[in-house]
Image (tube, rainbow, N blue to C red):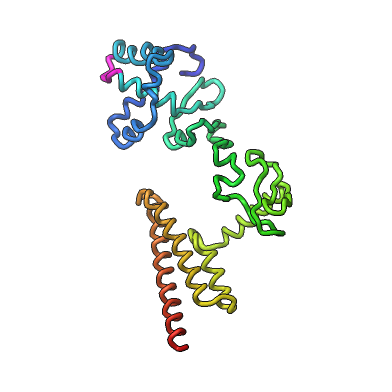
């Protein structure tokens, strides 16, 4: 709607019409038509009848737009299900924007996403899905850490509260959330010092260091190399879904394959040395 103009039902058809004009751009049109519409659930509802009057009938009968009713209803569904309210400058009226990737953020079967736009910045959401409510994150313990006293796992007593106390599952020792955040920040800084993209780097580097200090046997070094290789192989299996044109499916995938090959070659050298050592004995 133009600045200073009065609301009118005829404005309802403008954005669906703009989407319809994208039919001559196959790549964009394909992405658009893949978005969820919930058109069957909307059928015979108040919003469906409103769209029929102010969008479908108006475009087809008054504007002679060449598009069938079902397509126009699906475009309305795409907008209602996936679009976001924008906050333009004062005097520019209400606006909606369609962001294909951002519309997928609602990733739980139970709605758990709240998004807001502040100028050009999109604010993220506080997730409340089953995994985020579980202190163990569905037994993945992705955010847990080891207790300094008994080496058991330390988890938040209330995962949805950023200031909740953390408690050890073994000895019951408690830590304030501020200490856990400091620990995470320190670990993050250390992780960034590792080789970029090396998921196996910590395991292999630690094993090599301990072997050089004669703290582990060649057999244990070999086991660590094979474990590191499994980490890289898992990364490759995850990256295989990424298009080759993206950084993840291109350069990162190639790096992972090269790293896996390096693990194989290093493991073979250690395996050969173990065989030679056994034969000499």
Q: Which residues are magenta?
A: 64-69
Picture residue at 68% right of the left edge, 56% below the top: 147
Indicate the quadrant where residue 188 lies.
bottom right
- When the figure is inspected, residue 54 is found, relative to residue 22, above or below; the finding is above
Q: Is residue 118 left or right of residue 171?
A: left
Q: Pinpoint residue 117: horizontal percent, then vertical percent.
A: 54, 31
Task: Pick out the residue farthest to the bottom.
Answer: 280
Residue located farthest toward the left when viewing the structure as drawn: 66
Eyeballing the image, is 141 above or below 256? above
Q: Nearer the viewer, residue 268 or 261?
A: 268
- Tell me if 141 is positioned left or right of 173 in this view: left
Q: Is residue 200 above or below residue 137?
A: below
Q: Position of residue 220 (x, y in %)?
A: 52, 72
SS majority, magenta:
loop
Count of all numbered marks drawn on residues in the image = 0
Question: Is residue 261 magenta-colored?
Answer: no
What residue is at 45 percent from the left and 36 percent from the top? 104
Report the residue at 27% width, 31% height from top: 24
Residue 57, given in percent of the width and then of the height, sits at 33, 12
Q: Quadrant of residue 205?
A: bottom right
> Residue at coordinates 38% horizontally, 59% vertically from top-left?
254
Quick check: 125 left or right of 47? Answer: right
Considering depth in this image, is 124 or 65 the residue closer to the camera? 124
């Amino acid at each position: 709607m133009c600045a200073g103009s009065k609301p009118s039902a005829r404005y309802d058809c403008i954005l669906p019409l703009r989407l319809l004009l994208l039919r001559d751009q196959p790549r964009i049109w394909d992405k658009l038509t893949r978005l969820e519409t919930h058109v069957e659930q909307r059928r015979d509802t108040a919003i469906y009848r409103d769209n029929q009057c102010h969008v479908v009938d108006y475009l087809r009968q008054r504007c002679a737009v060449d598009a069938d009713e079902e397509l126009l209803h699906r475009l309305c569904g795409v907008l209602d299900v996936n679009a976001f309210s924008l906050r333009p400058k004062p005097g520019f009226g209400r606006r909606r924007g369609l962001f294909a990737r951002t519309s997928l953020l609602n990733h739980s079967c139970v709605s758990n996403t709240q998004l807001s736009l502040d100028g050009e910045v999109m604010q993220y959401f506080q997730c409340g899905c089953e995994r985020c409510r579980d202190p163990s994150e569905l037994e993945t313990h992705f955010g847990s850490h080891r207790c300094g006293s008994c080496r058991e796992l330390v988890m938040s007593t209330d995962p949805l509260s950023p200031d909740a106390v953390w408690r050890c599952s073994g000895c019951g020792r408690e830590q304030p959330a501020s200490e856990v955040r400091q620990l995470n920040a320190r670990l993050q800084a250390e992780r960034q010092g590792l080789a970029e993209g090396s998921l196996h780097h910590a395991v292999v580097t630690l094993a090599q260091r301990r072997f050089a200090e004669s703290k582990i046997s060649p057999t244990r070094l070999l086991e660590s190399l094979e474990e590191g290789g499994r980490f890289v192989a898992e990364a490759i299996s995850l990256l295989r879904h990424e298009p080759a044109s993206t950084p993840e499916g291109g350069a990162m995938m190639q790096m992972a394959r090269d790293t896996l090959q390096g693990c194989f070659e290093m493991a073979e050298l250690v395996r050969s040395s173990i065989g030679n050592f056994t034969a000499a004995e």
